[in-house]
Image (cartoon, rainbow, N blue to C red):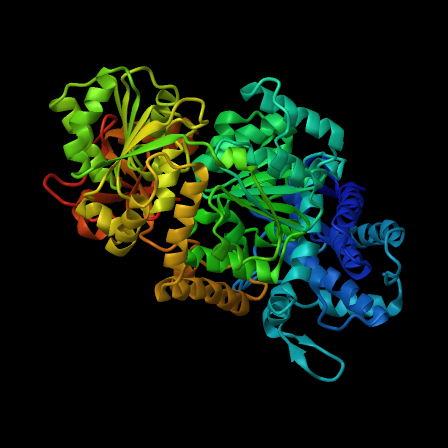
Amino acid sequence: MAQLLAKPDIPLIEHLRNVVKLGREIAVRLELDERLLTKALIACGLHDIGKATVDFQEYIRGRRGRAYPHALASMPVILMIEQMLNWQMGWGEHDLTATASVLTHHSPLGPELYKGFETPQWHPDWRRVLEEVQEFLRAEVRYLPDVNDPLVQDALQVLLSESPAGLLYEGLSFPDGRRASLHGIFQSLPPREFSQVKTVLHLADWLASAGKADPRVLFLDIPLSAFRAQLQKEIAKKRPEAQWRDFQRKAMEVRTEVLWLRAPTGTGKTEALLLWAGETERLIYLLPTQATTNAMWRRLRGIYGHDQVGLAHGRASYMLRKESDEDPLDARLLGSVFAKPVTVATLDQFLLAHLHGRHWEERRALAQRATVVLDEIHAYEPYTLGLLLEALDRERPARLALASATLPPGLLDLFPKGTLVEAEPSLWGRRRHRLEWHEGSLFDALPEAVQWAREGRSILIVANTVQDAQELYKRLRDEHAWEPRYLLHARFTFSDRQEKEALVEKPSPGTIFIATQVVEVSLDISYDVLLTEVAPVDALVQRMGRVNRRGEKPPAPVVICRRWSEGAQHVYGKEILTWSLEILSELPPEPTDADLAEAANRLYKRVMATENWWRELSEGRQTLDELQRILGCYTIDLSDEEMRQRFTTRRGVVSVEVLPNRFREEAYRLIEQGEGWRIIEFLVPVPLPWLRRYWEFFEPRSALRCLETSLPSNSELGLLPPTGELVEETYVIV
C-alpha cells in the first residue's frame, strides 16, 4: 500500500504531526487561551487532510495538471470536527475559526473563494490518515470527537457527499431548520480570534514545510546581559569608551507599557529605545520611509544577528535578495508577515495590515504580542495619524514606544498615556548651527555657496521641488563649472539613487550636494554648510541635522532663503510657509537643540489648531473603521475600485513607478535570465497626475509589468518633464 504524501519526500501523516507539535509551542508562546489553543491545534492537525484525494496524490507523484484545492477538500472534515467540539464544549455553533483558517491557509478569505468547484474524489486510505491524526491530537486537546463513532461517521458521510464549494455558498443546515452561508459565518467571525488561530496554523505549517523543528526561531531569546553588552559594543564603534547617557539609563528602567521618548538627533535615541525593549520576545520597529527602514534593518542586524531581523516594505524582497544570504522562507516570507523576532518596517506595512491587506491576519496577531516602536512619530500627516490612532485603539500591542527629536505635546495627547523620558539638558543645550538669512531665492544664493566651496567647505543645498533642484544643479554645472557636485532627488532610478547616496556620505572639501526633501529622513551625512529655502519648521530641523550632525564642531552656517519658489508653495502651502518663516525669524542666531524642538512644536501646535488638520485625522479614523466593518474577516479585494481607493496609508499625490525607455532592452534581458526581480533597479517614481497630463509619453509593457516612459532621462539629472513644462509638484515622500 503506497504511503500518502504531503510533499514529494514527506509522508502526509508525518507533516501533520510536525505541524501540530510546532503549533502547540507557538500558541503557548502567543498565550492563546484554551479554546483558541484547541481550535489552532485541530486546524494544524487537519489542514492538509484534503491532500488525501486521488488527484492530489497523483499530482504530488509527478502527474501534470492541477490538483483539486486541498484546503477546500479539507474543509468538510474540519467543519464536522469543529461543530462537534462546539456542541460538546458549549462554544457556540458559529464559532468556526478553525474551519475558516484551514479553508484560507493558501488563499485569502473573500466573496469568490473556491467558487464553482465540484466534489473531490477521496483516496481509499484517507480514513486511516484521519484516525492517525485523531490519535496524536487526543494527546494535545481536552476533548476530540471519535471519528469511529457512528454519529460522527454519519455526519461525515453527509458532508462529504456534498460539494465543499456548495457548502460555502448554498448554506449549512442547523437543527432548528435554519440555513446559514458558511461564507457569511466566516466573514463575521471575531477578526482577532480568526487572526490568532490562522497565524498559529500558518507559522507552524511554514516552519514544518521548511524542515525547521524549533519555533524559537520566531522569538527573541537573547539574555539581557548579553544584549546590553552587544549594544554597548555597537555604541563604542562611534564613541569609543562611551557609557550610557542618563536618558538611556532612565529608558532602561521604565517598566510601563507605553514609553514617550524625546531626544535630539545623534544622541543615542535608538539605543534608548532598544534598552527599554529589553528582553521582549518580539520587536517591531516602525519608521516613515523605505530608506530609513533599510538603514535601521542593517543596524539592528549588527546588534541582534542577521538571521534574527526581518525587513518589511514595498521593496523589501529586492533588498533581501541583494543583501541577505538567508533562506527565502526566513528572509522574505517570515519577514513580510512580522514573524521574525525583530522586524523593521515602514509604518505603512503596519497600517495596511489593519486595512486588511494580504497576510493581515499574521501581522496583526503578531503585533498584538510584540513591543512596537514608532520612531520619528512627528513625520506623519494627519490622515495617516488617524489610521494609526484607530488601529491602536482597536488593537494595542503588548508594549508601545513613541519617539522623536521633536515630540510635540499636542501630538502625545492623542496617544495612550506613557512615561516620558527626555534627553538630559546638556544634550538639548548643544548649539550646532548658526542661522543666517538671505533675502533672495536659492538661485540668488548659489554664488555664495560656490564661494564657501572654494574655501574648502562641504555644502548641502536643499530645494523643495525636484524641478528646482535640477535647475540649480544645471546652473552649478554650466555657469560655475563646479566640481565635485552631486544631485539627489526622488526621480532617479533606484540604482542611480543608491549609488549617489553612497557617494555623498563622506564629502570631500569643496563638495556641493544639491538635494530635495529626500535628505531629511534618509541619509546619515554631516556637511559644513546648509543652504535651504524656507520650509516647514520640522522639515528644516531635519535638514539642519545633516550639517554638524553630532555637534563636534563650532556652529555650522545655515543659510535660509526668505523667498520661496512657486513650486515650494504648491508642496507645502503658503500658510505653513508663512508661519514657519515667522517662527524661524524669532530664533536666536545660534539656537540650541531645545530651541529648534520648541520651534517645531510651535508650528505643530498652529497646524493642529486648524479645522483641516482635524478633518483629515477624522477621515483616517473613519476609513479604517469603515473598512474593518465592511470586510469583517475578508482580505481586501483590490479589483474593487471603491476598496482600492480606500486602501492607502497616505494622502497626497500617489507615485507610480515607470521604466525609462533607455532601459528597455536591459529589462527584457533580465526577464530572459530569470532575474526579473532586478527590474526595480531601473524604475523611477513619478506623480500619478503625470500619466494624465503627459499620457503620450507613457506606454504599458505587460511583459515587464510596468509602464515605459519616453520622457527624457539620464543618470546626471534623473527623469525630466517635457521641455519647457513647469510642473506643479504636490506629493508625499514615502
Q: Position of residue 541 (x, y in %)?
A: 38, 39
Question: In the picture provided, is 311 more to the left or to the right than 189?
Answer: left
Total marks drawn?
0
What is the quadrant of residue 80 in the picture? bottom right
Q: Position of residue 371 (x, y in %)?
A: 65, 46
The answer to whether 684 is drawn above or below residue 495 in the figure is below
Left or right: residue 526 versus residue 568 is right
Furthest-front residue in this view: 588
Along the line of sight, the residue nearer the viewer: 409 or 729: 409
Query: Quarter of the image containing the N terminus?
Result: top right
Residue 42 coordinates in the image, percent (x, y): 78, 55
Does residue 733 show up?
Answer: no
Task: Examine the image and state in which quarter residue 726 appears.
Answer: top left
Which of these two is toward me, 259 or 437? Answer: 437
User: What residue occupies the far bottom of the structure in this picture?
Assistant: 176
Horizontally, residue 569 falls left or right of residue 520, namely left
Residue 189 showing in the rendered view: yes
Instruction: Tell me which corner region of the image, top left, top right, bottom left or bottom right, holds residue 438.
Output: top left
Residue found 65% across the figure and 66% down from its top: 190
Q: Residue at x 17, y 38 (%)?
A: 441
- Indicate whether 135 appears above or below 295: below
Please give the name of the residue rendered at 62% of the width and 70% of the height, measured from the top-left corner.
Answer: 188
Q: Position of residue 730 (x, y in %)?
A: 27, 50
Decide: is 386 above or below 405.
below
Query: On the rendered image, what quadrant is the C terminus found in?
Result: top left
Residue in front for this viewpoint, 402 or 50: 402
